[in-house]
Amino acid sequence: MHDHRKLGRELGLFDTDPLIGAGLPYWLPDGAVVPHTLEEYIRAAERRAGYRHVYSPALGKRELYEISGHWAHYSDDMFPPMNLGGEQVVLRPSLCPSCGDLSPPFPQLPRTAPATSWVGRYVPLRALGRAWRADLVHRSIFGSVERVVAHLIEQHGGAFPAWLAPAQLVLLPISDTELPNAAALAQGCTRLGLRAEIAGPGPRHSRRTYPRGPPDSLPSRHRRQGGH
């Protein structure tokens, strides 16, 4: 089994900095493609299923999380409250309470309120242990995107399926003479929704975008050039 911490750095997907903090990786350009593409894949699947997406604030009043039960269960793992305008607010430990407040009155249920965003708490391997509201059904496809990417790095050994690969098409002109044609081809592929780049000769040029079609419209596997 591959170690995502080692392989992710070797492939230039992410790195860490002591000034940022232990366990807080930052995504490099190639690495940022992977969670972005995963999130877009899920959003597209949800839209096809009739979901309409929402966003909610990253901060919430402490009272909200006291009512939801998160404060009683997670306060030791949450960031401390901040005083804002005479009220105590906290970084949300979960999307559920704020998204739940977007639900319409009971007679109009059921409704869905999917959201993809970050939460601010240390997440041990345990469950909340209770329902927040009787009319709220929790559903999490990813949980932690970072955790999913770590699993995929180890599962595929860095050779992601083509729809998820940072570079889906790498052009290698053998001399400067071919560079204009290679650039035109890369730009054309980008307009079609592919992530294309030119690798040599000389300085490396990049053309990046994200796939617009379903994953099965692309080849099954693609391994990055350069020995990875």
Image (cartoon, rainbow, N blue to C red):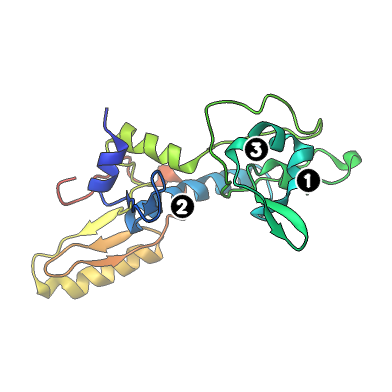
Mark 2 or 3: in front is: 3
Foreground pick, 96 / 124: 124
Whether residue 100 appears in this view of the structure is no
Tag 2: Cα neighbours inside 10 Å, few (<14), some, or many (≥20)?
few
Upstream in the sequence, badge 3 or badge 1?
Answer: 1
**Residue type beneath disc 3:** Ser
Foreground pick, 223 / 114: 114
**Residue type beneath disc 1:** Glu
* Apparent side of residue 33 relative to residue 156 in the rendered image (left or right): right
Q: In which quarter of the image is residue 100?
A: top right
Tell me if residue 3 comes above or below residue 26 in the rendering: above
Tell me the SS state at disc 1: helix
x and y, in percent, of residue 52 in the image: 69, 50
Upstream in the sequence, badge 2 or badge 3?
Answer: 2
For disc 2, the marked residue is 36
Tell me if residue 35 comes above or below residue 86 in the rendering: above
Residue in view at x 28 percent, y 34 percent: 3
x and y, in percent, of residue 220 in the image: 33, 40
x and y, in percent, of residue 37 in the image: 45, 50
Upstream in the sequence, badge 2 or badge 1?
Answer: 2
Tell me the SS state at disc 2: helix
* Apparent side of residue 7 relative to residue 64 in the rendered image (left or right): left
Q: Mark on residue 75?
A: 3
* Apparent side of residue 45 relative to residue 137 in the rendered image (left or right): left
Tag 3: Cα neighbours inside 10 Å, few (<14), some, or many (≥20)?
some
Tag 1: Cα neighbours inside 10 Å, few (<14), some, or many (≥20)?
some
**Quadrant of the snapshot with the N terminus:** top left
Residue in view at x 78 percent, y 42 percent: 111
Q: Mark on residue 63?
A: 1
Residue in view at x 44 percent, y 42 percent: 146
